[in-house]
Amino acid sequence: MRIYLPATTTVLRELLDAGAIGSPPQTAFAVTPGLREWYVDDDPEELEYAAMVEAARGSLRLIDADAEAARRRVVIAADVPEADVRIRDDLDRGVVEVAVPVPLAAIASVHVDDAEAEATVALAAESIIAADLGAETAQERVDDAEGYELSWYATQEIADYLAQL
């Protein structure tokens, strides 16, 4: 099952050091029945993209809590056995819990913001909690960050990416 883990640049460094990420259960996003129902689209690529957008929003929450992380959203796409995933649409659409650490070998790709998104992402990270609580101005800042597309990286490129920060 393809999952999308919200992360930070700090988590990417930990992934390279430890060879795996996560302390179970860890929250991720995937194409779940709740996401399918909400999105009302049967296009698999569109549904996967919607799950990744939810994970990118989760990344904002992690950035807000991680003073050391670069102000860039990070989403890790990984393929894990369905037996290791529990669907949690009761929490929010597309939410899953992963019962195991995710090894580097299971990671399909990493998606991150480019440098030009940093200022906007920083404002969005500072505003994400208020946006979650319904503040209109805060939601506009989050929406601004979501206007930036995440760039795709292979796992072999993670170290080079982090060296550029």
Image (cartoon, helix red, strand yellow):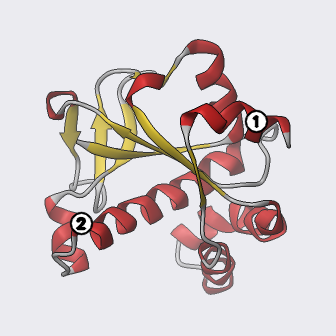
Whole-percent x and y of residue 11?
63, 32
Residue lying furthest top: 18
- Which residue matches tag 1? 160
Q: Quadrant of the N terminus?
A: top left
Asked whether residue 165 appears in the rendered view, the answer is no
**Residue drawn where x is 70% and y is 68% of the image:** 124
Vertical arrangement, residue 8 with respect to residue 90, above or below: above
Secondary element at image label 1? helix
Vertical arrangement, residue 8 with respect to residue 128, above or below: above
What amino acid is found at the position of numbered circle 1 in the picture?
A: Asp
Q: Quadrant of the C terminus?
A: top right
- Which residue matches tag 2? 35
**Residue drawn where x is 24% and y is 58% of the image:** 31
In the picture, measured across the screen, residue 108 lies left or right of residue 15, that is left
Q: Residues within 10 Å of mark 2 (few under 14, many from 20)?
A: many
Secondary element at image label 2? helix
Give the image quarter of residue 10.
Answer: top right
Whole-percent x and y of residue 26?
40, 33
What amino acid is found at the position of numbered circle 2 in the picture?
A: Leu
How far apart marks 2 and 1 lie (CA) works out to: 34 Å
Closer to the eye: label 2 or 1: 1
In the picture, measured across the screen, residue 34 lies left or right of residue 93, that is left
Out of 66 and 13, give the one closest to the viewer.
Answer: 13
Does label 2 or label 1 sit earlier along the sequence?
2
**Residue drawn where x is 24% and y is 66% of the image:** 35
Out of 131 and 98, give the one closest to the viewer.
Answer: 98
In the picture, measured across the screen, residue 90 lies left or right of residue 146, that is left
